[in-house]
Amino acid sequence: MNDTICAIGTLVGESSINLIRISGNKSIEIVNKIFDKDLTKKESHTITYGFIVDEKEKIDEVLVSVFKSPRSFTTEDIVEINTHGGKAPVKKIMELLLNNGARLAEPGEFLKRAFLNGRIDLIEAESVSDMINAKTESARKMSMKGIDKEISNRINSLREILLSLIANIEVNIDYPEYEDAVIVTKELINEKNIEIKNKIEELIDSSNNGLIVKNGLNVAIVGKPNVGKSSILNSLLGEEKAIVTDIKGTTRDIVEGNILINGIDVYLYDTAGIRETDELVESIGIEKSISKIKESDLVLFVLDSSSNFDYEDKKVLDNIKNKKVLVIYNKIDLGNKKVKELEKYDSLNISAKNKNCVEIIKQKIFEMFNLDDISNSDFTYISNVRQISLLKKCLKISEDIENEIKKDIPIDLMEINIKLLWETLGEITGNVYKEELLDEIFSKFCLGK
Ligand SMILES: Nc1nc2c(ncn2[C@@H]2O[C@H](COP(=O)(O)OP(=O)(O)OP(=O)(O)O)[C@@H](O)[C@H]2O)c(=O)[nH]1
Ligand SMILES: [Mg+2]
């Protein structure tokens, strides 16, 4: 923590500028040694034009920003050097910084310092990381809610209720003679616990939407050979990405593409037609199809409406039994066969040869995942797996408290779980943290952040 760290903040390639960031109590002193202006005399939050120099040689023409402690992202002194884009100037300036006493930052180290110095909490740090990875408008909106403390405020308000309960229980025990203290009864604990439990449940329930916004939907297109899977993929993508022929077993490898449905990323995977085969390449493809099914959020089970539901279709069905399935009766221009065994699934009748199939399929996926709900929401969702699993732990503790109330357990014993709930909620925001977990969390973030 006492080291001064440096990292490249931008993606190095050919761009107009690159940003190098230095944080720590020696950052001004270090940059001063390689800059032709005196930075020590500069006010905080100013930008200075000048040259980075190595001895007498000018290395690059730059703009240098100074943010003095504590008014900076990490709360330490931060200097940012805007160099020209291009690998050579950045590499040379990084070399000079390292030779003059800075150390290369680890992934997420700037964020980690911001967290350890109390500038941001864990939820905000994780949201910054999500913002960096955000590919869609929806993902951006959701990350912004996290950065803006919307989620943290919700968790903190639950912790405040618990803290006040804990404080009053302690006063009741230690100073029973205090008449103006709130007397904590089982009814009061029950009321507060139910309020907290409902809020936790709400957050857990809506986290499914959060995960959809963050990760998109994985959709596997499966079926026996020749039913029109690749034709459907091509129609949805609006390009001839997969090879289409009337030869069974045309698709061998997974062919992927992605589309947006109401601002949500939908990843499509066209797979090899599933059937029994001795052909080595085809059977490897079929194994891939089956593992893709396992990873998918939705399976488009494609059937040929002009032929009977046969042994091969049944084999495909065996592989998708526990998945969310949309049955697609394709080739309706050739027939209109329906399958009794599939009545329980959502289904569509289309012809991949007819362009209107795209809107029909998109609309159905939109309905099946309630994407309407998401686009009309304010995007205050939890989408981080660490946060979701801690919330589930909190829910379990809250249920334990509920049971203790039913069993008429003494209040001073109930306090143990109330404290545990308060602490576990604090783990979500990082108010309570275990040192060894921090490295794991921050090391997943990108370099230079
Ligand atoms: N008439 C008609 N033909 C279709 C339709 N959809 C696909 N086809 C034809 O059916 C044949 C097989 O289509 P593909 O899209 O290659 O089928 P597939 O399911 O990907 O087949 P494999 O890759 O072998 O598993 C091609 O000749 C397509 O032109 C449709 O809606 N109507
Ligand atoms: Mg195919």
Image (cartoon, grey):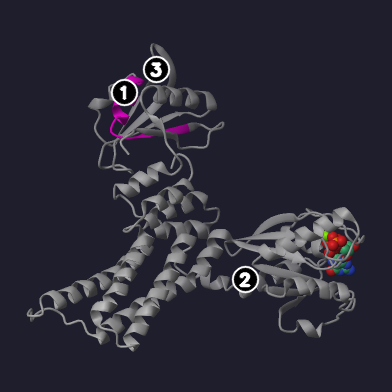
Residue at numbered disc 2: 366
Q: Residues within 10 Å of mark 2 (few under 14, many from 20)?
A: some
Q: Is residue 20 magenta?
A: yes
Ligand 1 resides in the quarter of the picture at bottom right
If you read the primary sequence from the N terminus, does the residue marked by circle 3 or circle 1 appear first? 1
Secondary structure under tag 1 reads helix
Residue at 30% x, 84% y is 190
Question: Quarter of the image containing the N terminus?
Answer: top left
Q: Which residue is mark 3?
A: 53
Report how many numbered discs are placed on residues in the image: 3
Q: Counting other residues with Cα less than 10 Å from the Cα at mark 3, is it few (<14), some (14-19), or many (20 or more)?
A: some
Badge 2 amino acid: Phe
Residue 166 lies, in percent from the top left, at 23, 72
> Is the residue indicated by label 3 positioned so its CB lies within 8 Å of ligand 2?
no
Say which element carries label 2. helix
**Residue at the extreme top:** 56
Question: Looking at the picture, does residue 168 appear above or below residue 243?
Answer: below
**Which is nearer the eye, 163 or 12?**
163
Q: Magenta part of the protein: which range?
A: 18-35
In front: label 1 or label 2: 1
Residue highlighted by disc 1: 32
Q: Give the side of residue 377 with respect to residue 343, left or right.
A: left
Q: CA distance from mark 2 to mark 3?
A: 57 Å
Q: Label 3 sits on what residue type? A: Val
